Amino acid sequence: DDAARAPGAGADADADAWTWDAPWVMGDAPPHRERAAACLMPDGVSVLVHGGLGRDGAVLGDAYVLDTKLWEWHAAPTAVRRSVGKRAGHTLSCLPRAAGGPTIVAFGGRGADFEDVADLVVVDADAFGDRGATPAPTTLPMSMSL
């Protein structure tokens, strides 16, 4: 269905021809944003995008996943949005675990009121299989090292 497609969420590079091709992307694409954080999920296919600044300058707390095999967007589980909260200019890392879903680590950035956020939030995102669950995040103070 071409009406459900939107150009531009990612690009394929052809290193031999020095060209880029923007694929057609389907699904629930995120609205425009800047200063968002993204990471490649341990499956090597899915890209998680979180937060950033919306067109109106508001700090966003939403999260989306792009399946790069199907080029299809969908909203990330509620657990990710609730646990990490509204942030812009932060970092996001998706780390594999021996069992269950990935561990998502968010660090720093600016919060909902543009305050500096100097914490490290660790979310064991088993909820990627259950979109309604909310795992408890672990917030580590800046003085703690991993």
Image: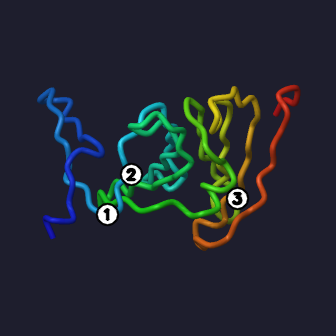
Task: Report if the CB atoms under discs 2 and 3 are less than 8 Å apart.
Answer: no
Q: What residue type is disc 2 on? A: Pro
Please provide percent x and percent y for residue 17. Answer: 11, 29
- Report the label total: 3
Disc 2 packing (10 Å; few <14; some 14–19; many ≥20): some
Q: Quadrant of residue 100?
A: bottom right
Please provide percent x and percent y for residue 113. Answer: 64, 34
Q: Secondary structure at mark 1?
A: strand
Above or below, 34 against 60 in this view is above
Q: Secondary structure at mark 3?
A: loop
Q: What residue type is disc 3 on? A: Ala
Q: What residue type is disc 1 on? A: Gly
Q: Earlier in the sequence, mark 3 or mark 1?
A: 1
The mark found on residue 27 in the picture is 1
For the point 46% across and 51% down, the residue is 44
User: Residue beneath label 3, please?
Assistant: 98
For the point 46% across and 33% down, the residue is 57
What is the CA distance from the residue labelled 2 to the residue labelled 3? 30 Å
Look at discs 2 and 3 and give the one toward the viewer.
2
Q: Secondary structure at mark 2?
A: loop
Task: Report if the CB atoms under discs 3 and 1 are less than 8 Å apart.
Answer: no
Disc 1 packing (10 Å; few <14; some 14–19; many ≥20): some
Quarter in which the N terminus is drawn? bottom left
Q: Quadrant of residue 12?
A: top left
User: Residue beneath label 2, please?
Assistant: 30
What is the CA distance from the residue labelled 3 to the residue labelled 1? 30 Å
